[in-house]
Amino acid sequence: MKSESIAFALAGVLFGLIAGWIIGTQQAASSPSAARDQAAARQEPAQEPVRQQPILDEAKVTAYKSAAQQNPNNPEPKVQLANLYFDAERYQDAIEWYAAALKLSPKDVDVSTDLGVSYYYTNQPDKALAQFDQSLKINPNHTKTILNVGIVKAFGKQDLAGAEAAWQQVLKLSPDSPEGQAARRAIEGLRSAHPPTGSSAKPGA
C-alpha cells in the first residue's frame, strides 16, 4: 500500500464532517463553503482554508519511469509512480499506474485498494466500490479496504446504513487497530448527528 495512512487521509478529513452532517465528496468537503458551514455549526468565525498544492517530485518520476521501462514485468516501479502521483493529488495519473501495476500483480490487495481510493478521489464512487469488491475477493478481512468501503458509502453514495455496517465489520475484525479506532470514531460521529431511536446506541453493539 502507498502508506499506512491512505485510508486515514480520507478519514481524517471526512470523519470530522459527520457531526456537522456535511455530505459530499472529498473535494466538496475541502471547499471554502464547507469550511464556512463547519465553522457556523461550531459558532466560530469562518476562515478560508490555507492549502498548498502538493509538489510532484519530477526527478523521482523520471527515475521510476526509467525503471518501469527497463523492467516492464516488475510492478514495483509502477506502484511507486502511482504513489508519487497520488501524493501530488494527480489522481488520474495515479489510476493509470496503479492499474498497470495491478495487471502485473493482480493479487496485490494493497494496490487494488489504492486504485479504489484513487477512483473515489476522481468522483467515481461506483468504480471505487467495485474495486474494493475486487480487493475483498483477494482478502475478505482487509480492514483498510472495509474502512474505505464505509467512507465511500457514506460520502460518495450517501448510504449511511451501508457505511455503518462496514465500520461495524472493521470493529469486529480488529477493534484495537488504527482502522478499528477510526471506525469507532466514524460510528460515534454518525450517531451523534443521527441518534438511533432504538436501544443499540453504542458503537460495536
Image (tube, rainbow, N blue to C red):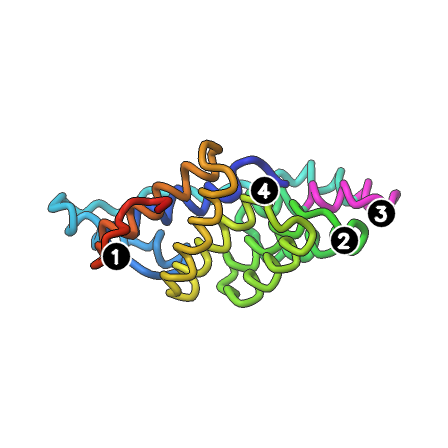
Evaluate if marks 2 and 1 touch, with contact meaning CB atoms under 8 Å apart. Answer: no
Q: Estimate how packed mark 3 is, as few (under 14), some (14 to 19) or many (20 or more) residues with alpha carbons within 10 Å.
A: few
The amino acid type, in three-letter code, at marker 4 is Leu
Estimate the spatial distance between the alpha carbons at disc 4 and disc 1, rounded to whole Å: 33 Å
SS category of the residue bearing label 2 = loop
Q: Residue furthest top?
A: 176
The amino acid type, in three-letter code, at marker 3 is Gln
Task: Name which residue lies at 34% across and 48% down.
Answer: 187
Q: Estimate how packed mark 2 is, as few (under 14), some (14 to 19) or many (20 or more) residues with alpha carbons within 10 Å.
A: some
| Image-based side of 55 in relation to 106, left or right | left
The amino acid type, in three-letter code, at marker 2 is Pro
Residue identified by numbered label 3? 69
Estimate the spatial distance between the alpha carbons at disc 3 and disc 1, rounded to whole Å: 47 Å
Q: In this view, does 157 lie above or below 88?
A: below
Picture quarter with the N terminus: top right
Q: Does the magenta stretch include residue 155?
A: no
Estimate the spatial distance between the alpha carbons at disc 2 and disc 1, rounded to whole Å: 37 Å
Estimate the spatial distance between the alpha carbons at disc 3 and disc 4, rounded to whole Å: 20 Å
Where does the image place residue 84, in percent across and percent down from the top left?
A: 62, 42
Query: In this rendering, does residue 94 appear at all?
Result: no
Q: Which of marks 4 and 1 is nearer the N terminus?
A: 1
Where does the image place residue 104, in percent across and percent down from the top left?
A: 81, 51
SS category of the residue bearing label 4 = loop
Which disc, if any, is residue 34?
none
Residue identified by numbered label 2? 106
The amino acid type, in three-letter code, at marker 1 is Trp
Magenta stretch: dominant secondary structure: helix
Q: Earlier in the sequence, mark 2 or mark 4?
A: 4
Magenta span covers which residues?
A: 66-81
Q: Earlier in the sequence, mark 3 or mark 1?
A: 1
Which disc, if any, is residue 56?
4
